[in-house]
Image: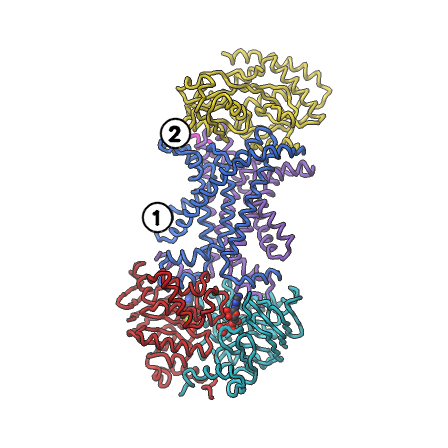
Chain colours: A cyan, B yellow, C purple, D blue, E red
């Protein structure tokens, strides 16, 4: 479904992504973990060409694009196959909560306005924000914004979902709900790439976990492999610390 | 007094002009679009009572039209625009104190002159004696209306006597500045100076000296046009006739209370 | 200063009579200029060197050179070169000229405002599958509007005042009439006073509209917070 | 059209001679107006009804009524009422008048840009212990600058062109001289052509400066991202 | 040190904070937990008057302010006693990383520019961003931005620190570091109010945990009390879910 080959990204002199190769099968849920500033967000942003890669190819659902020769049309097509949840939520500031979810549906995905509204309403129910329907983003709490961001992405029902820390502003019970949501989506064969700092979440949600460091994929495996038997020393150190912090909660 | 004498000659005018019109009966009526100034009182201006221009120029032009079998449509526009319209063929001529200088003659054909403009020095009221001869200008600050040959003439005086020249966009501002004492004198048409004095809001008067220059005014036409040549011939005839039968003088006295038509 | 209030009253209607001309030219040109500027702002992002060079020339020419001169060349220059333009009325020429002129600076006002919209908003739109044009239409322009209003209103007021240059084409508006009356009666103070009153009231009305519009467009910030900051500053 | 290129060449230096006047008035008034507008923008946040009413009047008067009229009243009206103003030179009056005039619309341009800075930036500054003034100075104005540049440049170019109204006070600038020469030779096309060239080159230079400034002030957005969007649009 | 009495906050018709009373002693570290949209951020924002409370009084370090009568000067003084970490980081976008930290020091806290720079440099070392010294915020990753936000607040060394989810964008090893940092600050008698969604973090860092729901403080107690023996049923439910999610990590 998603295939990344030899992806490099440089910001001026800063080489952020080094020859990243990654294949994700249809319906697979892949978590990306790794230290801050390692290039996880940049990777997601390159996948839908919000950031033009320096080199490499991106293939989603049979459409292959490389930065050397890609037309505007191809980039639009590529983006139509994915949806993204941003680390900073990035809601449309001039649109109400409902419109934030409905706008992409009717403007880019062929829904009628009425159908888009209806769908948006149902999504709002799901994320528990029906009463904030007509609020503008500035009047939302951090967690509410994040949920709208999630709602906007899942409403699109894309082939590939790119989640950049989708639970960072959520309290544990909401994290649980997002987990449920992702499981439901996975059952519907949505392919998901999730950047997260919450190891528990990564462990519970994913078919595969990828550990990135310094712009490269260091290790990739099942949650058990990565969290319990990491082979790479860097992974080991990272997972070690992650689990160490404060120790597991004891009831 | 003068007004009476000229008006007494008015009845005779139609009879004389009848001859001319007879001579031109075969020639068809020509329609002319004529541009003029909207705020050059008393030559051509509009006021609160009427949107159509009035003034000496308008009266003269209407009279010429009558005699020369012309139909005229007189319009006002910004002064510089009027010349654009002339060049672009949207106007046939301009009726507002246009002097045929050599430079302008290169560009336009002119009719015979019909108006004289005496230009001299104006000073604050009560100081008419302060400037009596050219030498008195030395060291003074003299305002002049921009864009005419008045300005060029003043500059040419600089060889004989040194003084400061300040150009103005509108005569009003320089008259105000003179009245306020920001200027020592202005170089303007005697008609305008007298008019300002007459209005009473701007205490100035002509200096006690003869006008420095006299320029004549005529109607400019775009060159190389047969139609214009025909029009010029007709206008010239009408002007001559009006000068001879006193109509010109009558209009001069009506608007200026001064003879400005003896060329 | 012997200010003649009676004359003011007498002359008022004769000046006010030309208000429709001022307003017609201003609103017509303003509307056309807005359309043009939005197009220009959109074209600004097309990666063609030639197009950008043309737009730069357009911008520098129309915002840089005096309007009188532009009108003069448009109306008289063109008429001399291409005779069909002789049939262009002064009014039409004024509207065309002022539209082109206004579009040049309005496009810059809008471009400035568009720049103020955070790039993340565009990214979010693109990631949601919208095209660049759709992002502009639904996200960027609406957010830029609030920022652009004060400057566009400035531009419009400027346009409204500049209709007086149409007098160079023989089209008489409020200011042209004012100047003309002032010039012939030499009662500049009185005539200008009338003009001031007319323009001031017009501007006041536009200003009220501006305030209403700014309030209406302000959905992206905490109004309450803003109020608090005012009461503290 | 018998366009006399020789005359153009002959007349060029006599018009160019007045460029310093245009530039002096424009830069002086521009600088004063910038200072005034920043003050006005700051005063706009003071919660005093009277002050706000005064500022509104100032704004409506100076941006709404024609500059000529403002200069006329300033120069002739004041001098008739208060004799000390008789000593005011035309140049000074022009600079004062144009500064006041320009400050009115520049202040709106700046206010618009200031509004575009996200309120969270102000909040962050306040929470860090800065005063409102400090937040304005270090956070808001620098961020607003990028947004304001295109409109302020518009305003400045407008100011530069409007120096010609100083001619009503007897101060001759490029455009006044152009009109005057046009008026005496009746070669308006040629004279205007010279003016166009001078103003166009000036504007071109200012535009280059504007581009440089915009680039320099643009530290808050992803330049690379922006480049990418251009190549796509 | 910090004393809040009868604090109410309404946004138009929305009553967000209901009669909140809260006292924090000098050097105490208090965590606030609670579901999304409950008013936690609003509470912090009211404490330094970024949001003017509808009613109630705030006392910090002897300075009492109420919305009915407070001068500009008093509000400035109040703010001088606290520093805040924002949920969305809110870095100064026109300033480099270094300047973000140095600016408040020299402009509001009487440091010389040189001293401010020096201090900022040392903070940068501490948060591991010395190499990003001259980067502008747009070029930072989410975690890097959050660390700069933390650095900016601690550089001020205020009496009271208001942390709004200071670790949301950080990976576990950095969370650990922030934990250390807070402990160090607590030793220096800084008073801290920390809104967080990470229960482990709350548990490990705080002297006292407060559970907020629907704009009111429901329960307050030691971490053990709240997490192990919550008395209020709402708290119980919340904590239950939090701990439930995926269960503790097992090594
Ligand atoms: N526009 C940009 N210009 C220059 N450098 C950038 C830009 N965007 C990101 N970077 C740098 O690239 C690196 C990777 O950033 P990225 O946002 O991908 O990190 P991340 O893995 O998502 O980290 P985090 O977990 O903290 O969000 C960082 O060091 C960042 O400073
Ligand atoms: N400016 C505002 N105008 C109107 N309502 C607002 C405003 N700011 C916040 N709210 C509302 O107040 C409530 C509390 O918001 P707050 O940001 O304090 O929540 P929170 O507890 O911090 O939640 P989270 O954990 O999701 O950040 C929310 O329902 C929000 O929608
Ligand atoms: Mg990231
Ligand atoms: Mg919050």
Left or right position of D102 against D81: right
The image shows residue D115 at horizontal and vertical percentages of 45, 56
Tell me the tag on residue D50.
1
How many neighbours does mark 2 have within 10 angstroms: few (below 14), some (14-19), or many (20 or more)?
Answer: few
How many neighbours does mark 1 have within 10 angstroms: few (below 14), some (14-19), or many (20 or more)?
Answer: few
The image shows residue E178 at horizontal and vertical percentages of 40, 76
Q: Are marks 2 and 1 on the same chain?
A: no
**Rendering quarter of residue E92:** bottom left
The image shows residue E44 at horizontal and vertical percentages of 37, 69
Q: What residue is rendered at 60% in x and 57% in y?
A: C45
Per the rendered image, the range of residues in magenta is C6-11
Tell me the tag on residue B220.
none
Q: What residue is rendered at 30% in x and 67% in y?
A: E58
Kind of element beneath mark 1: helix
Choose between E182 and D107: the one closer to the eye: E182
Choose between E35 and D67: the one closer to the eye: D67
Residue A59 belongs to the span the image colors magenta: no
Query: Against B133, is A115 above or below?
Result: below
Q: What residue is rendered at 67% in x and 32% in y?
A: D2
Kind of element beneath mark 2: loop
């Amino acid at each position: 479904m998603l295939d990344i080959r030899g992806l490099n990204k440089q910001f001026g002199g800063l080489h952020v992504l080094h020859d990243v190769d990654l294949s994700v099968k249809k319906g697979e849920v892949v978590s990306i973990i790794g230290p801050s500033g390692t290039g996880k967000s940049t990777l997601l942003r390159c996948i839908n060409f919000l950031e033009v890669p320096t080199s490499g190819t991106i293939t989603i659902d049979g459409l292959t694009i490389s930065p050397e020769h890609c037309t505007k049309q191809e980039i639009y097509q590529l983006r139509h196959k994915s949806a993204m949840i941003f680390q900073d939520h990035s809601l449309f500031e001039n649109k109400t909560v409902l419109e934030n979810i409905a706008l992409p549906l009717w403007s880019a995905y062929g829904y009628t306005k009425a159908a888009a509204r209806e769908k948006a309403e149902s999504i709002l129910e799901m994320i528990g924000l029906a009463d904030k329907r007509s609020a503008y983003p500035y009047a939302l709490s951090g967690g509410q914004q994040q949920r709208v961001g999630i709602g906007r992405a899942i409403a699109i029902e894309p082939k590939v979902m790119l989640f950049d820390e989708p639970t960072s502003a959520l309290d544990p019970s909401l994290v649980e709900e997002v987990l449920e949501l992702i499981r439901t989506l996975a059952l519907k064969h949505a392919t998901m790439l999730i950047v997260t700092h919450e190891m528990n979440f990564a462990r519970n949600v994913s078919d595969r976990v990828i550990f990135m460091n310094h712009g490269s994929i260091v290790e990739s495996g099942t949650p058990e492999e990565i969290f319990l038997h990491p082979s790479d020393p860097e992974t080991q150190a990272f997972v070690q610390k992650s689990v160490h912090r404060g120790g597991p909660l004891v009831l | 007094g003068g007004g009476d004498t000229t008006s007494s000659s008015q009845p005779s005018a139609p009879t004389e002009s009848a001859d001319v019109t007879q001579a031109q009966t075969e020639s068809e009526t020509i329609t002319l679009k004529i541009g003029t100034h909207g705020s050059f009182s008393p030559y051509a201006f509009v006021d609160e009572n009427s949107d159509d221009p009035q003034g000496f120029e308008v009266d003269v032009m209407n009279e010429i039209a009558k005699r020369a079998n012309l139909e005229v449509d007189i319009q006002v526009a910004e002064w510089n625009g009027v010349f654009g319209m002339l060049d672009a063929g949207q106007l046939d001529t301009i009726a507002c104190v246009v002097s045929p200088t050599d430079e302008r003659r290169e560009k336009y054909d002119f009719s015979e002159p019909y108006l004289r403009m005496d230009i001299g020095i104006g000073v604050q009221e009560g100081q008419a004696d302060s400037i009596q001869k050219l030498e008195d200008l030395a060291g003074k600050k003299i305002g002049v209306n921009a864009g005419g040959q008045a300005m060029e003439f003043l500059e040419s005086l600089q060889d004989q006597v040194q003084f400061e020249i300040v150009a103005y966009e509108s005569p009003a501002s320089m008259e105000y500045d003179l009245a306020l004492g920001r200027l020592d004198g202005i170089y303007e048409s005697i008609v305008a100076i007298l008019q300002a004095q007459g209005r009473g809001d701007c205490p100035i008067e002509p200096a006690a000296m003869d006008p420095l220059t006299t320029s004549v005014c005529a109607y400019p036409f775009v060159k190389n046009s047969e139609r214009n040549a025909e029009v010029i011939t007709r206008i010239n005839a009408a002007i001559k006739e009006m000068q001879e039968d006193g109509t010109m003088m009558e209009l001069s006295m009506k608007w200026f209370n001064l003879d400005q038509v003896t060329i | 200063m012997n200010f003649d209030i009676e004359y003011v009253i007498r002359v008022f209607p004769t000046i006010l009579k030309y208000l429709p001309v001022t307003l017609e030219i201003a609103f017509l040109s303003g509307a056309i200029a807005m359309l043009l500027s939005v197009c220009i702002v959109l074209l600004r992002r097309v990666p063609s060197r030639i197009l950008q060079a043309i737009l730069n020339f357009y911008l520098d020419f129309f915002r840089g050179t005096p309007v009188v001169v532009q009108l003069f060349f448009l109306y008289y220059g063109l008429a001399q070169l291409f005779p069909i333009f002789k049939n262009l009325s002064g009014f039409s020429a004024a509207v065309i000229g002022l539209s082109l002129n206004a579009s040049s600076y309005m496009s810059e006002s809008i471009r400035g405002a568009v720049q103020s919209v955070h790039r993340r908003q565009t990214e979010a739109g693109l990631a949601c599958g919208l095209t660049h044009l759709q992002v502009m239409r639904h996200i960027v322009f609406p957010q830029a509007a609030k920022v652009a209003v004060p400057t566009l209103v400035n531009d419009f007021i400027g346009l409204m005042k500049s209709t007086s240059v149409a007098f160079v084409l023989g089209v008489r508006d409020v200011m042209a009439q004012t100047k003309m009356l002032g010039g012939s009666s030499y009662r500049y103070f009185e005539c200008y006073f009338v003009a001031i009153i007319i323009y001031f009231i017009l501007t006041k009305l536009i200003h009220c509209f501006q305030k209403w519009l700014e309030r209406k467009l302000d959905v992206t910030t905490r109004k309450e917070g803003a109020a608090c900051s005012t009461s503290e500053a």
